Image (tube, rainbow, N blue to C red):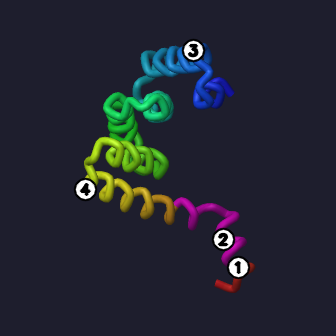
Amino acid sequence: MLSKLAEKGVPSAESRAVSLFKKSIALDGSTAEPHYQIGNLALLRGNAQEALQYFETAARLEPNRSKIHHALARTYVRLGRNEEASREQSIFLALKAKEDKSNPRFTILMRMEGR
C-alpha cells in the first residue's frame, strides 16, 4: 500500500517506503524485491542511473524474475543504451513465457481454446 502511494508521487509515502526497503536490505540483502522496489521508485522520479544500480542488484539476486528484466530494459532505454535494452527485453519475454506456461490459469485457458 505504501509503495503504491509512493508510485503516485506522495512525497512522505515515498521517503517512508524507501526507508523501509533500505531497512529490509540491511536486515537481509539477499532478497531482490526491496532492490527492485527502490529502483522502481527511482525510475518514476526520473533517476534512471540510480534505478539501474538497484535493478542490476535485483537481477543478480534473482535472475529468473521477468519483472526485473523488464525494469532493466525500460531503464536502459531511458539511458539510451539500446543494445542492452534489447537484450533485457529478450530475457524478459523468455522468462515471461515460462511464467505464463507454469501458471495454472494459463493451462486452463489453453485447454479451453483447444491448444
Q: Nearer the viewer, mark 1 or mark 3?
A: 3
In three-dimensional space, the C-alpha distance between marks 2 and 3, rounded to whole angstroms, equals: 40 Å
**Residue 110, image quadrant:** bottom right
Closer to the camera, 115 or 77?
A: 77
In three-dimensional space, the C-alpha distance between marks 1 and 4, rounded to whole angstroms, equals: 37 Å
- At 41% from the left edge and 25% from the top edge, which residue is drawn? 29
In three-dimensional space, the C-alpha distance between marks 2 and 1, rounded to whole angstroms, equals: 6 Å
Residue denoted by label 4: 83
Q: Is the N terminus in the top left, top right, bottom left or bottom right quadrant?
A: top right
Q: Which secondary structure dominates the residues rendered in magenta?
A: helix
Q: Earlier in the sequence, mark 3 or mark 4?
A: 3
Q: Amino acid at mark 2?
A: Thr
**Residue 111, image quadrant:** bottom right
Where is residue 40 drawn, in percent x and y?
48, 34
Mark 2 touches mark 1? (CB < 8 Å) = yes
- At 32% from the left edge and 46% from the top edge, which residue is drawn? 76
CA neighbours of label 4 inside 10 A, class few (<14), some (14 to 19), many (20+): few
Mark 1 touches mark 3? (CB < 8 Å) = no
Residue denoted by label 1: 111
Where is residue 54 drawn, in percent x and y?
37, 31
Q: Amino acid at mark 3?
A: Arg
- At 74% from the left edge and 79% from the top edge, which residue is drawn? 112
Write down the region rendered in magenta: 99-110
